[in-house]
Amino acid sequence: MNADDGLPETMRAQRLDTRTRTFEVTDVPVPRPGPGDVLVEVAYCGICHSDLSLLDGTFPALGPPVITQGHEASGTIAAVGPDVTGWQVGDRVVPAAGRPCGECRFCARGAYGSCTALRLMAFAYDGAWAEYTVALAAGLTRIPDNVSMEQAAILADAVSTPYGAVVHTADLRVGESVGVWGAGGVGTHVVQLARLVGATPIVALDLDPVVRERALELGADLALDSRAPDVAARIAEVTDGAMLDVAFDAVGLKTTFEQGLAMLGAGGRLVGVGMSAEEVSLGSTLGLGLSRKQVRGHLGYDVADIGVLARLVSTGRLDLSRSISGIVPLEDVGEGIRRLQERDGSPVRILVQP
């Protein structure tokens, strides 16, 4: 123990070498919070598809060559750094999964939510597949006592990114028709949030019959295999021929992107949430202009969104009880990664418990 602050000297953490794409769980020093920071004792941290993308090289490393992964965390404050007010040891919190750069023209005028060089947790700096993680106090969200730490953890991306896509990027309105390509970890929550906003009908499209059935149980009006030859006819049927107002591509592949675009009605919006290295086509400029279709890229969320979601869960408006598909100890993080990679059990989110 450190005689000055009572914290341990070392902790267990997953460490990824981005050069070799290999990782191990090992002992590292417990970090100390600097000015404006807090130290969070991690309760749970989700395994996200973007974590897999760093592991397989789809996403480039943005920080040090060896880094701790994990950006969907919940926990309690273990120590408070200098110049931090409003927070104390023991507070239940969710850290934001990024830090504003503090240097771009938006940060210079205090518009941190519009930062053009946001530093992503677990990509640019150490994440939370560890016993402790350092977080920016300004990016913390307080978690109500009746919200479990398991569900709180996934608010930091698995739920807040879909919320941002539905509410901010798509600007989804009551009564609009929606299609969701990929109803897994992100798409499941797009379905739930679209229903909460008042969209109708909601069509979920996925290759996995288990995922399609779950989507129906969580609020979709229709669930289709995207490979079926009658997809367009079925969507036309449930929308009275108008097709979709909004298509959410939660997969990010060429096939899902282009099928979503094709299923839009005149003036419809395609929101790209999933990401890959595949290139896509928008068709002819003539067709795009005549149809007035829009394509909107989406990434992340506003920090305030986590607080909104925490209240929705706390008051029973949003049910995330089926979103936790499993929990693995930190020492078995590799098993959790395998289950997500192989879609073993059609998981929504698997959590790591340090």
Image (tube, rainbow, N blue to C red):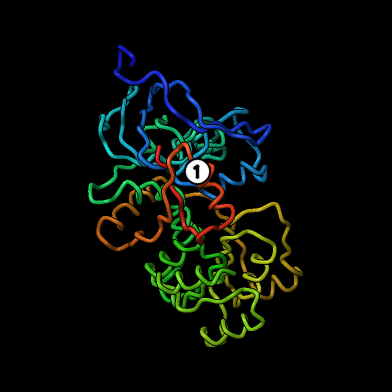
Which amino acid type is shown beneath numbered disc 1? Ser
Q: In the displayed structure, would residue 72 be above or below residue 16? A: below
Of 199 and 67, nearer the camera is 67
Q: Quadrant of residue 208?
A: bottom right
Q: Is residue 143 left or right of residue 219?
A: left
Write the residue at 25% across / 59% down: 315
Percent across and percent down for residue 120 are 53, 38
Residue at horizontal 46 percent and vertical 39 percent from the top: 112
With 38 as the anchor, is 231 left or right in this view?
right
When the figure is inspected, residue 69 is found, relative to residue 153, above or below; the finding is above
**How many discs appear?**
1
- In the structure shown, which secondary structural element does the residue marked by tag 1 occupy? helix
Name, please, the residue furthest toward the left.
145
Nearest the viewer among 335 and 116 is 335
Question: On the picture, is 207 further left or further right than 46?
Answer: right
Q: Is residue 120 left or right of residue 312?
A: right
Splitting the image into 4 quarters, where does residue 132 fall?
Answer: top left
Q: Quadrant of the N terminus?
A: top left
Query: In the rendered image of this protein, does residue 298 appear above or below residue 36?
Result: below
Q: Residues within 10 Å of mark 1 (few under 14, many from 20)?
A: some
Residue 228 spot, x, y in % from top left? 64, 79
Point out the residue furthest to the top here. 3
Q: Residue at x 46, y 53 (%)?
A: 349
On screen, residue 301 above or below 31: below
Residue 123 x/y as whole percent: 56, 36
| Quadrant holding the C terminus | top left
- The residue that label 1 is drawn on is 114
Whole-percent x, y for residue 59 in the image? 64, 43
